[in-house]
Image (cartoon, rainbow, N blue to C red):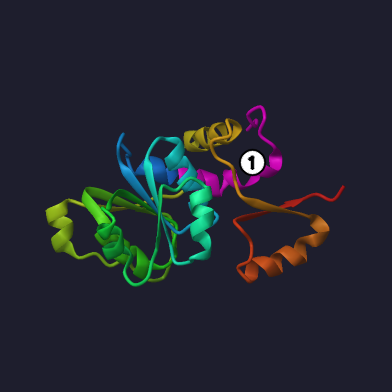
């Protein structure tokens, strides 16, 4: 696949995986104009989905467990940031709820909680893999007609659209770049959870 003009390879690299997943999750949610979208998990994928939702004109709420990420989320374009204290869904609902939750969190407990923050007809789209289940109370699900949807790398057009947004400057991956001889260093940073938000390894000159 050819890159759009103006998009560098290092910026494009994380889009072929994380960016693809983020755009597919957004499309799978069947967003409509005026939908309020919450992004659960502001990491390698979530920070991209946040920008996608903003670029598409939605009000965006970032949901994170880390107060340190609140400033980063606002810098990325979040209209509001929820730093979860106890129950993600109840706290989101207290802020007005969301029509769509795009979840990139591997915590199925928090996914289960967040589901309660959906407005009537809302959709939670999850991309995370875990051995734990998402637990859903059928009573509010029935009366609010809410749903849980899984998403991965879906239509290749999602990747094309993501690359186009990046080329237009509407989505900017936050990344750290390293040379190949620094591979061990970046693996340590990754294991320690210190990479923000993506690491790209470049070939040594």
Query: Which residue corresponds to the image point at 40% horizontal and 35% vertical from the top-left?
Result: 57
Res 153 seen here: no
* SS majority, magenta: helix
Rendering coords of residue 144 (x, y %): 16, 53
Magenta stretch in the rendered image: 1-23
Residue 134: quarter of image:
bottom left
Q: At 38% across and 66% down in the image, what residue appears? A: 84
The residue labelled by disc 1 is 12
Q: Is residue 18 left or right of residue 54?
A: right
Q: Is residue 111 visible?
A: yes
Q: Is residue 193 above or below residue 150?
A: below
Q: From this view, report whether residue 79 is shown above or below residue 132.
A: above
Please give left or right for residue 54 compared with residue 185 in the image: left
Quadrant for the N terminus in the image: top right
Label 1 Cα crowd, 10 Å radius (few <14 / some 14-19 / many 20+): many
Q: Estimate the x, y position of residue 35 in percent, counting from the top left.
A: 30, 41
**Residue 111 counted in the magenta span:** no
Could you say where residue 101 lies in the image, as x and y percent from the top left?
Answer: 34, 52
The residue positioned 45% from the left and 50% from the top of the image is 152
Q: How many numbered marks does the figure carry?
A: 1
Q: Nearer the viewer, residue 202 or 173?
A: 173
Residue 139 appears left or right of 157: left
Left or right of 4? Residue 27 is left
In the image, residue 194 above or below residue 161? below
Q: Which residue is outermost to the right?
A: 205
Q: Which is more toward the observer, 105 or 81?
A: 81
Q: Residue at x 61, y 50 (%)?
A: 174
Helix, strand or loop under label 1? helix
């Amino acid at each position: 696949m050819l890159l759009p003009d103006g998009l560098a390879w290092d910026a494009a690299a994380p889009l072929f995986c994380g960016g693809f997943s983020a755009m597919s999750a957004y499309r799978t949610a069947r967003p409509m104009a005026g939908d309020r979208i919450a992004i659960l998990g502001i990491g390698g994928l979530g920070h991209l989905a946040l920008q996608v939702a903003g670029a598409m004109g939605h009000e965006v709420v970032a949901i994170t467990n880390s107060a340190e990420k609140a400033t980063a989320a606002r810098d990325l374009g979040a209209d509001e940031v929820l730093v979860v204290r106890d129950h993600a869904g109840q706290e989101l609902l207290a802020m007005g709820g969301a029509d769509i939750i795009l979840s990139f969190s591997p915590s199925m407990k928090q996914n289960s909680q967040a589901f309660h923050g959906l407005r009537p007809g809302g959709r939670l789209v999850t991309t995370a893999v875990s051995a734990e289940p998402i637990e859903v109370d059928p009573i509010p699900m029935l009366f609010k007609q809410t749903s849980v949807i899984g998403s991965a790398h879906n239509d290749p057009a999602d990747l094309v659209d993501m690359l186009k947004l990046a080329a237009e400057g509407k989505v900017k991956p936050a990344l750290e770049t390293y040379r190949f001889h620094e591979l061990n260093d970046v693996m340590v940073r990754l294991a320690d959870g210190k990479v923000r938000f993506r690491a790209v390894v470049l070939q040594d000159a």
